[in-house]
Amino acid sequence: MNKCYIPAGYTPLLSVYDTQRAIEFIHSSFQSNLCHALNLKRVSAPLFVEESSGLNDNLNGYERPVAFDVPAVGYDAQVVHSLAKWKRYALKRYNFYPGNGLVTDMNAIRRDEELDNLHSVYVDQWDWEKVITREDRSEAFLRKTVQAIVNAIYVTNETLKIEFPQLHTDLSREVIFVTTQELEDKYPELTGSQRETEFLREHKHNAVFLMKIGGALRSGKPHDGRAPDYDDWSLNGDILFWNSVLERSFEVSSMGIRVDAESLDQQLRISGCDDRRALPFHKALLAGELPLTIGGGIGQSRLCMLMMGSAHIGEVQSSVWDEETRKACEQAGIMLL
């Protein structure tokens, strides 16, 4: 069932015209700030990949990719869910070296997404990936990278408020690091998403990096699903902020140090996904033929929502919505693009 929540007394802060201007400002400013913070170069990326390549992101494992045949080349293609795997191939093919990385505009279709204020079947994000050394595969390096990204978000938001004085979202560059096990210990009776919201409610004035997502906790259940073949579950996490408009935790990025041969082998076995070992990407990774990397995705519409104080993701991106959502937004004076 699709869900649409309209905050009491909510009114968009910008006109439709100024909304478009603000979206463009955020896109250009944040990408520049991110590239400077992480030493990234922009590259072009595919909208779809060969189905048999194993390059598509399997997300939580149940989402169905949009697939179609391509008679001219003789194989089927899939619209990407994300570029988590493709980026590692690109770093190798384009001869990137440790300390340097790439960023691209990733556009995806997630047909099985449940629609609400934050989720759309259309996904747009900055997908980035950076080559690292073996010594960089550490929690200390992960934390340092998270701090650099949060700094880029903070600077973008502060300059946005100068350009658009109507906006007043305050974001912090101070990051609290917490693990999923610590949240389960603190809120054992709550679900994963409820734990995030309660923790952010207690730390409204900080950014939070929630670490170690994918593996089973002491309860026997994972905090949230993660595919076994891109992030190392012991070296990953989500960047979260408190959203004062929606009164909830708000994820802007999923990221992490990527699997090496050892962690991929372990996570495939734990997940019961040993059949993927035969795919070209997985074979190359298990053979040590791909560079060690750190990377992630940063939601473009999510970041626009947060900084502009929007209540619904349809205010900052053009997608398709059910009739109930369209009527509820229209009655509340919310323009869906």
Image (tube, rainbow, N blue to C red):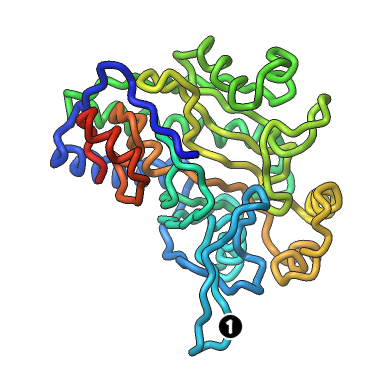
Residue at horizontal 47%, vertical 48%? 39
What is the number of callouts on the image? 1
In this rendered view, identify the residue nearer to me: 314 or 147.
Answer: 314
Callout 1: 10 Å neighbours few (<14), some, many (20+)? few
What residue do we see at 49% from left, 89% from top?
A: 72
Residue 241 shown left or right of residue 59 in the figure? left
Give the answer, above or below, for where 206 lies relative to 19: above
Taking the spot 66% from the left edge, 24% from the top edge, the residue there is 191
Residue denoted by label 1: 75
Above or below: residue 14 compared with residue 175: below
In the displayed structure image, the side of residue 122 where residue 214 appears, left or right: right
Residue 215 percent location from the top left of the image: 77, 37
Query: At 27% from the left edge and 37% from the top edge, which residue is drawn?
Result: 327
Q: Nearer the viewer, residue 183 or 145?
A: 183
Extreme residue toward the top, this view: 202
Q: Quadrant of residue 190?
A: top right
Q: Nearer the viewer, residue 30 or 242?
A: 242
Residue 5 seen in the current view: yes
Q: In terms of image quadrants, where is residue 256?
A: top right
